[in-house]
Image (cartoon, rainbow, N blue to C red):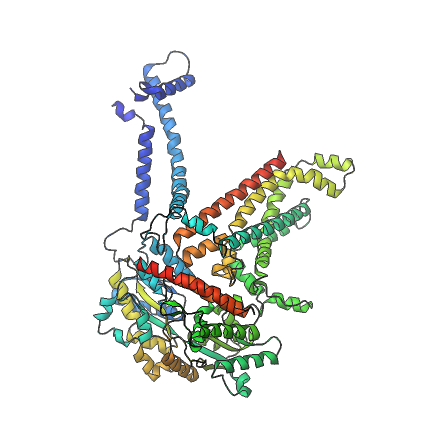
Amino acid sequence: MSTSSQPLSRRAFGRLAAAAAGAGALSACSSGGGKPSADAPLRIMAINHVWSQAVKRRTVEFEERIGRRVSMTLLTADQLASSYNVKLNASGTDVDVMMVRALQEQLLFGHNGWLADLSDRVANDARFAWDDFQEAPRQASVTAGKVLSVPVVTERPALYYRKNLVADLGGPPRTLEALMEGARELTRRKDGFYGYVGRGQRSGAVSQWSSFLYSYGGDFVVDGKSGIGSPESVAAYEFYGRLLAGSGPPGATNMSLEQAMPIFAQGKAAFFVDADAIYSSFLDPKVSRVRETVGFAPFPAGPAGAKPHNIPSWSLGINTFSRLRDDAWEFIRWAAGPEMSAALQKDGIPGARSSVWADPKALSAFPPELAEAMRLNAERGVGYDRPRVLQVGRARDIVGRPLVAGILGQSVRPVVRDADAEFADFLVRDNRHKES
Amino acid sequence: MPAMETTGAGGVATAARSATTRTPGPTPRGAGRRQRTFEQANRRLKWAMLAPAVLFVGLMIVFPLVFTLNLSLTDAFGAVNADSAHIGLRNFGDALGDTRRFWPAARRTLVFTVGAVVLETVLGLALAMLMRKPFRGMRWVRTVLIIPLLATPVAIGILWLLILDPTNGIANHLLEAVGAPRQEFLGSVGQSLPTLMLIDVWQWTPMMTLLLLAGLTTLPEEPEEAALVDGANAWQRFRYVVLPMLGPTLATALVLRAVDALKTFDILYATKGAGGGSDFEVETLNVYAYGLTFDYQEYGLAAAVLVLFTLFIIGVVVLLRRRGGRKNA
């Protein structure tokens, strides 16, 4: 009986504590294998966007169909990217459907094995009609031969302008040179008024600038090497810098969409090039003073013609670690299916299905001028608006540096030379990562 | 018989220690055993009581530190749990050799910290001296003073972004109203860091005031009264009597605030976004490490920068404590 009264030795106590800690840590970290219960919700993480809000309002219909609760979390783009990094680095199972930017994150997430392969699911589902998706967004969904996402929102740049101001300029500009002249003229006319407003942040401006780059005949990467040092690219950098430096508002280098859009909406700028998906902000009387005067035009032509981007801005994928992958696919079938795409496009949210774009009824929600601009931009569109690399964030930081120099009124050429060399080194490293 | 009493020097020493606490005189055998068992259980109990704290520190502090240190020696990229190779100190060499991002970020970290903390200390001390003697409405003033402390940094960032917006913000309307030229504030590469330092001063000066006010209220009044009798003026009483006595409080407040200012991230990120602005104008080491982790997914290099940043903070704390200690000696 003496053993029962013997206290634990220090070593034994240490072992016990370590075992308890280990067990605690394991139980905390483990995802609890096996099939989830019927009560477990299907977790969807999405961008706080009109598309997600519209889908969230309709989820009851889907819940009834699959007999499972849906939990939808809406975050900003940065928050969403950071959440994925944290959750998926820990092989988290607490997200099933992931809303991703195919051109920003998909290559890296695919490289990390975080997105489930949907190739068989899209190929074997005739009702889903994978071929109905527009060519460019469909191509952007494929990484290393595997379909990793399904596009749900597409985007092109639109030229927003003030009808009352361009009347004596001969209407909206059809070329980039006419845009520059018009913007300068209108800046000159009125103190505190700006001819042009647009994104000027180093990284944030790159995607909108891409349409200027393509329309000048340049590209980010040419034959696997840096293309930003070409004469065409330098001309595009110089043009964009001159446009914002000469006709833009102060503080343009700190402007992303959130800062630039209110300036146009408040009636303080004549022209604004940005995503066509935001047009409703200028028609909303609560935030817009230009509701009666805003006009919509296709992206103007540069020396190489009008070559705007036409991209899948948001897509849906499935977390590899999800334990509800079948239900997650059901959600994608429902949310990106032909019926839902048509319904959402009728509400003014541009999707990626060709059949919906071909249906005049589906475009009835858009102002006719904008619908025509979207159609033309989609026809002429290039399928990407940023370098297609693993480390898109670093690439945008490098490519965006000459833009900032131009907007600040500095000489662009030396900065382009430096950025070109840095981008060339970066591409070598990025390719090495891709192969690893 | 318990093994401790029969084997090893440790057991003998333990028994000897127990003997010193034992009641002198003959003790019944059963009672002595119970007493020993109780004492041994008591000794074990302290470990049991400490265990939660030790486990917490181990899991929440030691493990992440060791993990980060290990990560800093690898070429981890893309995902933390992806295959990676140990590359020795190469990440540290890359970081320390980076004159484009790392060293400018280190300089900005130092400039931001020194600038903000010096201003906060001077203003905080001045306000604390003014509020030292009771006055009418003191409770209201103190309540108003802590309002900036209660707001979250992100909300403060957005609030100031709106106030300082170069085109639509109220600050430029006010400047125009008094005939001053409009400013770009956070929209300007050159004005961003000073503007953010002033926002930090606005937010954290009240904390310095409250800390120093607490220190001032504990000071004895006699030395100051003696100096007054000797004919010292207000400045002399402050400089040669109050300030030396306030030294320890001031040193503690400085260390606390400096460490916090060195780590500032949220307000920089909320106002200037990833990378600390278009020309990296407010990119501090914290913002740089965040960018390497979440924008570039270069986890090995990010961990190395964080290790260097931690050493930098420890260096600043040691320096401040040494100087504080020397002054108080």
Q: Is residue B320 left or right of residue A425?
A: right
Given residues A257 and B105, the one toward you in this image is B105
Q: Position of residue A202 (x, y in %)?
A: 48, 65
How many numbered circles does the render carry? 0
Outermost residue, left side: A124
Quarter holding the C terminus of chain A is bottom left
Q: Work out whether B320 lies above or below A349.
A: above
Q: Is residue B175 left or right of residue A120?
A: right
Q: Is residue A24 left or right of residue B69?
A: left
Q: Is residue A272 left or right of residue A130?
A: right
Outermost residue, right side: B231
Q: Work out whether A235 lies above or below B290.
A: below
Say which quarter of the image contains residue A232: bottom left
Residue at the image point whose x is 39% and y is 53% from the top = B299
Given residues A294 and A411, the one toward you in this image is A411
Q: Position of residue A100 (x, y in %)?
A: 35, 65
Outermost residue, top side: B26
Q: Position of residue B101 (x, y in %)?
A: 49, 56
Given residues A212 and A364, the one toward you in this image is A212
Residue at the image point whose x is 44% and y is 62% from the top = A422
Say which quarter of the image contains residue A278: bottom left
Given residues B40 and A359, the one toward you in this image is A359
Whether residue B147 is visible to the viewer of this picture, yes or no, is: no
Q: Work out whether B226 lies above or below A392.
A: above
Whether residue A317 is visible to the viewer of this picture, yes or no, is: yes
Q: Work out whether B25 lies above or below A236.
A: above
Q: Position of residue A29 (x, y in %)?
A: 32, 48
Quarter holding the N terminus of chain A is top left
